[in-house]
Amino acid sequence: MNEREKEVELFYDNIAKDFDQFEDRLSDKILEHIILDNLPKNKKLRILDVGGGIGRFSKPLLELGHNVVMTDISKEMLEHAKKRLSNFNNISFVKESASNMENQISNSFDVVMMINGVLNYCKDYEKAIKESFRVLKKNGIFMGSVNNRFIYCRSHELKKEKYQLFEKNMKIGSRYIVWGGQKRGHISYEFTLDKLQKSLKRGKFKILKILGPFNLLDKYEIEQIENKKEFIDLQVKYARIPEYINNSTDFFFIAKK
């Protein structure tokens, strides 16, 4: 495990005990809607939920009867997930890195998921993409969401008038982030749309869709919305419109082996 991954592991070990507060976010409900809408239909699936955290996105998959292997770099997050999902017998848990899936057999999954910035936190994100390709069956689906470099740099460095840091981070893509009340953070590599597309293609994937799941409002501004169902329907509709994708806080990709 490299130093960046150790930093991420420590961050999530520390925040795990308080992570339930993030479970009911509207942003995650939007992502759940997109995940379920893009799963292969009419069959029970074997799904690898990489960086699954406390099992937020594994749970609806288990409820549909799919078989899930949930991995995470953080032991504490995995322990929390085991407790939350203890009523299900169609899930197993593995501590491992997204860029080194040494416990997973090649050509063994119908779907691999990396939701909420898992690729952003990998030092070698292209290796994580290649590992996803390796463990997927032929015609398997790879889906995930990553941070949009411009939106994150605009809403953080630019908003705080740190212009030189804004330009630096826009150029190199890497930002040091701290959130969730933690004292120490970790490096996050933010993607441009072009960088994401090229990385997936280098990993031998065929891109099926790239969506903008938070292109109406910043995903951190939507929690106070009262009519959540109507907003979710509206956001899912606009997420599909190509000319608005780059306005989104995150990019959501669906690709095929």
Image (cartoon, rainbow, N blue to C red):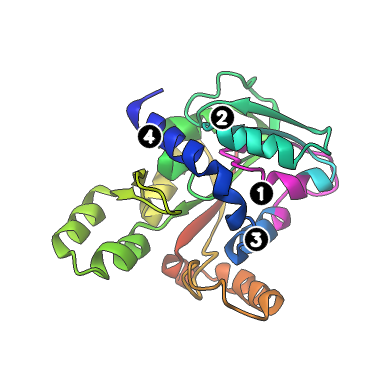
- Nearer the N terminus, badge 4 or badge 3? 4
Mark 1 and mark 3: Cα distance apart in space: 9 Å
- Nearer the N terminus, badge 2 or badge 1? 1
Please provide the residue range marked out in magenta: 36-61
Quadrant of the image for the N terminus?
top left
Mark 2 and mark 1: Cα distance apart in space: 16 Å
The label nearer to you, 2 versus 1, is 2
Report whether residue 148 is seen: yes
Quadrant of the image for the C terminus?
top right
- Nearer the N terminus, badge 1 or badge 3? 3
- Nearer the N terminus, badge 2 or badge 4? 4
Determine the secondary structure under disc 3.
loop
Left or right: 157 in relation to 34: left
Q: Which residue is mark 3?
A: 24
Determine the secondary structure under disc 1.
loop
Residue at position x 40%, y 56% in the image = 193
Residue at position x 57%, y 34% in the image = 76
Residue at position x 67%, y 53% in the image = 35
Mark 4 and mark 3: Cα distance apart in space: 26 Å
Mark number, residue 56: 1
- Nearer the N terminus, badge 2 or badge 3? 3
- Look at the numbered discs 2 and 1 and tell me whether their residues touch, using CB distance below 8 Å: no
Q: Which residue is mark 2?
A: 75
Q: Residue furthest left?
A: 164
Left or right: 47 in relation to 177: right
On the image, the x and y values in percent for residue 129 come to 49, 35
